[in-house]
Amino acid sequence: MKITVNWLKNKCACSGGIFWFKNQKETDGLKIVKKLINEKRPDWASWLITFLMDRTQLKHYSQNTVYLYRTEMLEYGIQILEQQA
């Protein structure tokens, strides 16, 4: 999907996200998601990816995101505990 400034405004993107978008050249949605992840903006990448998905994909994504987040947090907690041991 091609992303434009107008598309972002119609989806109520934040002003920071629109500013970032204007200052880069990519317009392909999936490539932008990957670029945002590489630039340490998973919050914006997560926001965008939900608009790129159809209903079935979005349902699968939302169901699994919670599990993956919890798993990562548990792994991080284990690392903290192991460092103290």
Image (tube, helix red, strand yellow):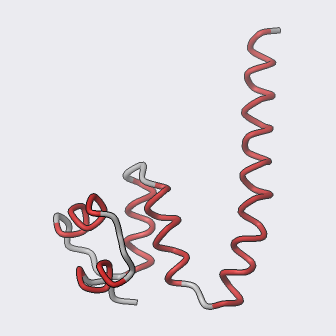
Q: Quadrant of the C terminus?
A: top right
The residue lying toward the viewer, choosing from 4 and 10, is: 10
The count of marks equals: 0
Q: Residue at x 55, y 76 (%)?
A: 50
70 above or below 59?
above
Locate residue 65: give its quadrant. Answer: bottom right
Q: Residue at x 33, y 88 (%)?
A: 2
* Quadrant containing the N terminus in the rendered view: bottom left
Point out residue 21 in the picture as x, y percentages from the top left corner.
25, 68
Query: Residue 60's x, y, as percent?
Result: 75, 78
Question: Residue 43: image x %, image y %?
Answer: 48, 56
Q: Quadrant of residue 37?
A: bottom left
For image coordinates 33% across by 84% down, the residue present is 10
Q: Position of residue 20 (x, y in %)?
A: 24, 61
Q: Quadrant of residue 62?
A: bottom right
- Identify which residue, 52 or 30, lies in the foreground: 52
Which residue is at 57% across, 85% downward? 53
Please state if 79 lies on the left or on the right of 43 as rendered: right
Query: Extreme top residue here?
Result: 85
| Residue 41 vertical placement versus 61 (above, below) | above
